[in-house]
Amino acid sequence: MKRFNLKKLPLHIKLLAYFLVFGAIILIVLWVFQSFFIKPLYTMSKSMSVEKGATSISKAVQYNKNVWATIDSVALNYTLSVYLYDVGGGAPSFSRECSYENPAVKLNMEYPDVLKYYERTVDNGGKCSFVASNDVDDVVSKRVEILKKSGASIDSVDAKVHLTSVSENESLVYTYIIDRTDGRQTFLIITSSITPLNITLDVIKNQMIVVSVVFVLLSLFFSLYASRRIARPIAETNNAAKELAKKNYSIEFKARGYREVEELNDTLNYAKTELAATEKLQQELIANISHDLRTPLTMITGYGEVMRDLPGENTPENIQIIIDEATRLSTLVNDLLDLSKLQSGALQAQKKVFNLTDSVKAIFDRYSKLIEQDGFNIMFENNEDVYINADELRISQVIYNLVNNAVNHAGEDKTVIITQSIRDKRVRIEVIDHGEGIPADKLPYIWERYYKVDKEHKRGVIGSGLGLSIVKSILDAHNARYGVRSAPGKGSTFWFEIAYESVKRRKK
C-alpha cells in the first residue's frame, strides 16, 4: 500500500486545509467559551459591580455623609438591594436603620439570617461575599395566581419554564462591618440578583448552531478563494521556472499577487536575461576558440605537408612558422586551463614579497622581437622600486596580458606605455595604448569570460584573446582594484592597484 505523503500535496490544497483547521479551532473555542465560561464571567462581573457599590456606600456610612443619596444612586445604577443594621454594644443584636430593596427578588432578612451573615462576616475579617438562594416563595405564589387568572395551566411547559426561571434565581451577597467615625458599627448587606442563564444559554446554543453552519460555509468559500489566490502566482512562477530550466529564455515571469512574488519574478526575469546573454556569449566563445584553435592547426598541417611534398621547402623559416603556431596553440590551451582553474578556485595564490618593478622590467624581454622587427615602442615609466606581497607568477601574468592587449590594439604609432605610481599606500600600474578605443556601452562587459569587443576573427599579434578574463580572476583573488578608461579613437588605459609592502626611492 502506497504511503500518503503530505509534502507532495499541492500548495493550494495545503492552504485550504490550514484555513479550515483554523476555522474549526475558532468554532471550538466559541463553543467552549459559551458552554463553560459565560456563567463564571457573568458572576465575576456582577461581583466587581457589587464590590464597587459596597465601597462607595461604606465610605458614605463611615463618615455619615449623604448616606441615602449614595445608596439611591448606587442601588439604581447596579440594581442592588441595600440593608443597613446598627450593631448593638455587646450582644449581636441588630436594629434595621434603613434599606433599599429590589422589589423583584429579595433575600430573607429575618433576624436569624442577619445574625448568620454577621457571624460569617466576623469570621472572615469584616468582609465577606458569597452566593445565596433567593426567598422567592411569595413571588412564585403571585405568579401562580396570575397564571390561574389568565386561564393557563400551571402544568403547561410555558408555565413551568416561567416558574423555574424564578425559582432558580440566586443572589450575590456582599457583607461588610463598617467602623463609623462616631464610634459605632454598622452592618452592611448588599445583594444583587444573578439572572438565571439556563434559558439564555439555550437561546445562545441555538444561535451558535446557526452561526456555526454559516461560519463553516463562509470559511469553506473563503478558504478556497484565499488558497487559490495565494497559490496561483507561485504555481505560475514555478511553471515558468521549469521552462527556463529547459533553456526557454523567451519565457516571462509575470505572475503578480503580492510583493514577495513580484520581487521573485523580477529577480528571475533578471536571471533569465543574464542566462540568455551568457548562453549567447558562450556560443561566441566556442566559435572564437574553435577558430583560434583551427588556425594554428591549419598552419602547422599546411607547412608540414609542404615540407614533406616539395623538395627544398624544409627551410628554417618554415620550421619557425610551425614552431610559432604550435606555441600559439599551446598558449591558448594553457590560458583556457588557467581561466578554468582561477574561476573554479582550484588555483590558489602563492603569496610572497617580491619586487614588482623588476617583474615588469623582466616582461619587456618577451617583446624584444616586436620592438626590433615590427617597430613597437614599449616604455615603462617609474621612479622607485616597489615591493608587494602577492603571487609573483600571477601578477606577472596580469601585467603580461594587459601589455598583450595593448599591443594587439595599439594605434598607428605602435606605442604602449606602462606607468608605475604610488597613491594611498597602494601601487598603481597603468597600461596605455593609442588604439581605436572601446565604446562606453561595451566597457562593463570587457572583463567577462565570454565577451569579445571585436567580433571579427583575426589573428592577434600575441596572446589567446582570454587575457582580460584571466586578469579579472587573478586581481579578484588578490582583492585588488582595477578598471579601464577608454573612448573611441582615443585609446585605452587599463589599470590596477594593490597594497605594497615597501618602497625604495632611487637616487637621481
Image (cartoon, rainbow, N blue to C red):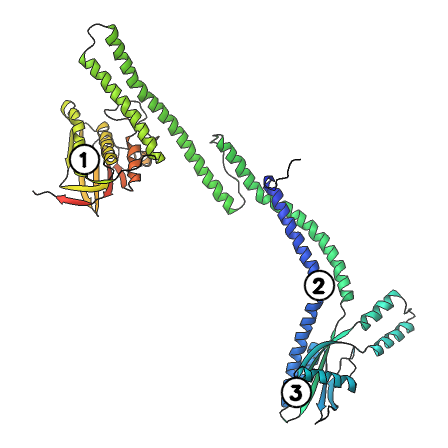
Residue carrying label 2: 36
* Element under disc 1: helix
Q: Specify the amino acid type for callout 1.
A: Ser
Q: Quadrant of residue 411?
A: top left
Q: Of the residues under marks 1 and 3, which one precedes in the sequence?
A: 3
Q: Give how far apart the Cα atoms at labels 1 and 3 are.
A: 106 Å
Horizontal side, residue 108 vs residue 233: left or right: right
Q: Is residue 413 visible in the rendered structure shown here?
A: no
Q: Quadrant of residue 12?
A: top right
Q: For this rendering, which residue is in front, 255 or 173?
A: 173
Mark 1 nearby-residue class (10 Å; few <14, some 14–19, many ≥20): some
Residue carrying label 3: 178
Please give the label number shown on residue 359. Answer: 1
Percent across and percent down for residue 49 are 67, 75
Q: Is residue 197 visible in the rendered structure shown here?
A: yes
Q: Specify the amino acid type for callout 3.
A: Ile
Horizontal side, residue 277 vs residue 219: left or right: left
Vertical comparison of 139 with 205: above or below: below
Vertical comparison of 234 with 81: above or below: above
Q: Which residue is painted at 46% across and 38% down in the image?
A: 269
Q: Which residue is painted at 75% across and 82% down in the image?
A: 101
Q: Of the residues under marks 3 and 2, which one precedes in the sequence?
A: 2
